[in-house]
Amino acid sequence: MTQFSVGPFQRVAPGVFVAVAEPASVNIGLIVGESGAVVIDTGSSPAQGAEIRAAAQAVAGVPLTAVVVTHAHYDHIFGLAGFAGITSFGHEALPEALSGEVVAAAAAELGLAVSELAAPEQLFSLARVIDLGGRRVEVLHFGPGHTDSDVVAYVPDADLIFAGDLLESAGPPSFGTDSHIKDWPAALDGVLGLVGEHTVLVPGHGLAMDRIAAFEQRAAIAGFYAEVSDLVARGVVAEAAYEAAQWAFDEETVRAALPLLYAQLAEAGVTPKRQLPLLGS
Ligand SMILES: [Zn+2]
C-alpha cells in the first residue's frame, strides 16, 4: 500500500518555501507575493494535491492564485485535480502525455483512474509570467529533456529556480522512456543561462543545488550521451555496452538507461555497424 504524506513547508528564501511529499520525496514549491501565491508541482494524487493546497494556503497568508506543473510525471501532476478553481499552468505537451503509457502505468500502480487526473488550463509553448504582486515568477520551457513537457519556475528577485526533474540531487538524473537524453543538456543550458554565482536551484527531488552542481550534472548527462554514441560508432551492441566504458552514474542507472538510449539512437538511424576488415593495401 502506497503511503502518502506531505511534510511542512520550509523557508528556502524570503517568501519561498519547499515541502517534501511522499511517496516520491518530490519537492513542492510555494512562492508568495504581496497579493497572490503560486504552488509548484502538486503531489501524487488528487487527495494529496488538496492537502498540499490547504497547507500552502495556511503558510501563504495571501490567496493561492496559481499552480504550475513542471512535467507529466505522477508525483508532479497527479495532485493537480486537488487545485480546482485555481489558475493552472503547464507546457502544451502535458495533455498528450496524460493520455500516454507512462501516466497510465503510474496511475494503475497508485490505484487511480486516469479520468480522475487533470491537465493545466493555461498551456504554453515557451514562457509565461505569473504576477504575484511585487514579485513575478517566470515559467519557462527550454525544449525536451527529462520529458518533453519540462518547465522551470524562475523567481528573479529571490535568485531561485524550481527546476523540476531536469535536475536531481537525491540521486542520478531520472532517465525514462519519455526522456530525450540527447536534448537534455541543451535544455539545461537554458536553465544555466539564468544562473549566477548565488542562484539556488531546487531540483525535483533532494536538497537545493548550486550552479557548480548543476553544471556537473549537465556535463554528466552530455558525457553519457557522447559515450554511448561512441560505443555505437565502434560497433558495440547494447548488451555489451556497460562493460565497454566507464560511467558517471551508478551501475543500476546506467544499465537501465543504456537500452533507452540505444533505442533512441536507433530511431535516429544510428545503430552499431559490424566493422569490416580492411582488405589488402
Ligand atoms: Zn520526472
Image: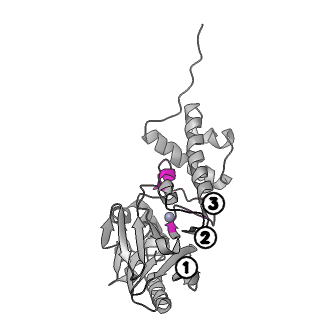
The stretch drawn in magenta includes residue 169: yes
What is the number of the mark on residue 18?
1
Q: Residue at label 2? A: 208
- Image quarter hosting the N terminus: bottom right
Q: Nearer the viewer, residue 161 or 118?
A: 161
Q: CA distance from mark 2 to mark 3?
A: 10 Å
Query: Residue 128, position in %: x, y?
Result: 35, 68
Q: Is residue 224 above or below residue 73?
A: above
Residue type, numbered disc 2: Ala
Label located before the other in sequence (2 or 3): 2
Q: Secondary structure of the magenta portion, mostly?
A: loop
- Magenta-drawn stretch contains 166: yes
Q: Is residue 243 left or right of residue 225?
A: right
Q: How much space separates mark 2 and mark 1, taking CA atoms?
A: 10 Å
* Pointer 3 residue: 213
Q: What residue appears at the point 58 percent right and 74 percent down from the top-left corner?
A: 25
**Which color scheme is applied?**
one colour
Task: Tell me where residue 40 appears, x and y as whole percent.
Answer: 46, 75
Q: Which residues are magenta?
A: 162-187
Image coordinates for residue 146, horizontal then vertical, percent: 49, 58
Q: Are marks 2 and 1 in contact (CB under 8 Å)?
A: yes
The kind of residue tagged 1 is: Val
Residue at position x 55%, y 35% in the image: 232
> For this rendering, which residue is in front, 83 or 223?
223
Query: Which element is circle 1 on?
Result: strand
Nearer to us of marks 3 and 1 is 3
Q: CA distance from mark 3 to mark 1?
A: 19 Å
